[in-house]
Amino acid sequence: MGAVERHLGASGTTFRAAVGGDCRRIAELVRIASEGVTDYVWSTLAPEYPGMALIEVGAIRYSDEESVFSYKNCVVAEHDGEVIGLLLSFPVEVESGASSGEPVDLVLEPYSMEVPGSFYICSLAVLPESRGLGIGRKMLDIARERARERGLDTLSLLVFEQNQGACRLYEREGFALVDRAQVVPHELIHYTGDVLLMAAEARRNGMAEQPRRREP
């Protein structure tokens, strides 16, 4: 994970590269951050794992070392031996190539917005009882560092417009609106309204190039 191996942060919190044994907690934290979107994704994968709880399906997903969602692309925040926060991030290809030809999942389509050539923050989560300690801001600093290590100038992320606390954090950290899409209502997804694509310069503030859609 390059220079981001261990960081001593707020209130004695340590930041480290995730390991395979963290996959269950990664799934739990991604579930918090996604507000039901990952539960929907895991539900589409569930037929491959009959009888398995959705959270376990998620843990399997993050254990796949060949996937962009692998634990290898995660940094975790740890306090007193407990993982309390997560950053899952990876580069977005400049060119995605031809469409796979597979049918588009209409529920997931709003989350296919992306900024080509950016460093994408797929998930940033902190346990509710550990918020307010600056862990989210530190995770964004780590994301910026990881982007610069890869020669990328831009960070990007998706956030629900109704998640006002997260929107305020990202705006304070220099993120600005690039695009928006309407959430497709689903019983597993907690928010309605719009999902926002936001971007910032890896070296602080600024807008990115125009967005595109990717296959979910």
Image (spheres, grey):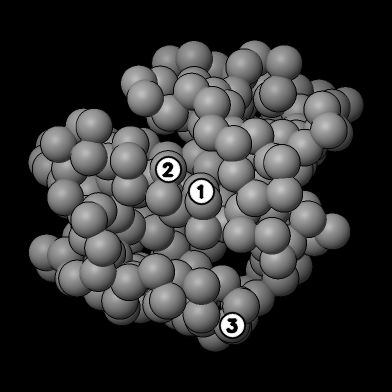
Q: Tell me where residue 2 sits by quadrant.
A: top left
Label 3–label 2 contact, CB within 8 A: no
Seen in the picture, residue 180 relative to 43 is either above or below; the reply is below
x and y, in percent, of residue 91 in the image: 28, 38
Density class for disc 3 (Cα within 10 Å; few <14, some 14-19, many ≥20) is: few
Front-lying residue, 33 or 187: 33
x and y, in percent, of residue 27 in the image: 70, 37
Front-lying residue, 205 or 154: 205
Give the mark nearer the N terminus: 3 vs 2: 2
Task: Name the residue beneath numbered marker 1.
Answer: 139
Give the mark nearer the N terminus: 3 vs 1: 1
Residue type, numbered disc 3: Gln
Residue type, numbered disc 2: Ile
Q: Which quadrant: the N terminus? A: top left
Q: Could you give the CA–CA distance between mark 3 and mark 2, rounded to whole angstroms?
A: 23 Å
Residue at 33% x, 47% y: name it: 144
Seen in the picture, residue 138 relative to 73 is either above or below; the reply is below
Residue at 15% x, 36% y: name it: 151
Q: Is residue 18 left or right of residue 12?
A: left
Seen in the picture, residue 106 relative to 13 is either above or below; the reply is below
SS at mark 3 in the image: helix
x and y, in percent, of residue 93 in the image: 19, 39
Task: Name the residue beneath numbered marker 2.
Answer: 142
SS at mark 2 in the image: helix
Task: Name the residue beneath numbered marker 3.
Answer: 164
Label 1–label 2 contact, CB within 8 A: yes
Mark 3 or 2, closer to the camera = 2
Q: Could you give the CA–CA distance between mark 1 and mark 2, rounded to whole angstroms?
A: 5 Å
